Amino acid sequence: MAETLDEFAARLAREGGAGVFLERLRRHLIKVSLRAEAGAKVNVVQRFKSMGGLVNSIEGKVAKSDGDLAVVLSAKKPYARIQEQGGTIRPRSRQWLAQPVGPARTRAGRNRRTSPRQFPGLFFRMSKHAGKALLMDSASGQVYFVLHKSITLKGRHYLEDALKVAAGELPGDLAELVQVLEKPA
């Protein structure tokens, strides 16, 4: 037999009140936030070649907003938003974005040096593709960098997908919480 709202409130008061209920709820939400954080970190490892800094910046927590509890998942790197949502990257202080290829690139896909200017003997050549150019070695003709006016990234949704999975587990957690409260005294 289901109890009425008044009966539930009376039982809640006998068992320690709403404060106990909210504390138990907060503990369950902390578990959900930790699962979401772990899931987001797994998503980054699976979806990106090398993003160790991004993985280490992901944080899940429970925050209070207008009296409500909320699970918050965030990443603290400046490039986290564009990797999550997608968007267009344009150069800030130069004309071109330099993408390392061939000998200028490490196995992880990073630039071997901090700037294309640190590679002596490279020359500039316009590409057949609009908005692109090449930096090539003058001796061998090998391409070291592809230069772009802009690059558009698709969103990888590593945070959003982790929150969806964690939220899918939340009804089970809430049912478990209610079962704890509904045990007879």
Image: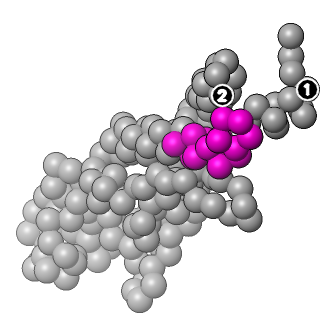
Q: Which residues are magenta?
A: 13-27
- Residue drawn at (40%, 55%) of the image: 58
The 10 Å Cα crowd at callout 1, few under 14, some 14 to 19, many 20 or more, is: few
Task: For the N terminus, give its image quadrant.
Answer: top right
67 vs 8, nearest the viewer: 8
Classify residue 137 by image quadrant: bottom left
The 10 Å Cα crowd at callout 2, few under 14, some 14 to 19, many 20 or more, is: some
- Residue drawn at (43%, 71%) of the image: 78
Question: Mark 1 is on which residue type?
Answer: Thr
107 vs 69, nearest the viewer: 69
> Which secondary structure, mark 2?
helix
Would residue 168 be found to the left or right of residue 110 on screen? right
169 vs 10, nearest the viewer: 10
The answer to whether the residues at label 2 and label 1 have Cβ atoms under 8 Å apart is no
Residue 156 is inside the magenta segment: no
Question: Mark 2 is on which residue type?
Answer: Leu
Instruction: Give the label on residue 181, or none.
Output: 2
Residue 62's x, y, as percent?
Answer: 54, 53
Would residue 177 be found to the left or right of residue 93 on screen? right
Residue 141's x, y, as percent?
Answer: 17, 63
Residue at mark 2 to residue at mark 1: CA–CA distance: 15 Å
Instruction: Give the label on residue 4, or none.
Output: 1
> Which secondary structure, mark 1?
loop
| Among numbered discs 2 and 1, the one appearing first in the sequence | 1
- Residue drawn at (45%, 84%) of the image: 92
Residue 44's x, y, as percent?
Answer: 39, 45
Dominant SS in magenta: helix
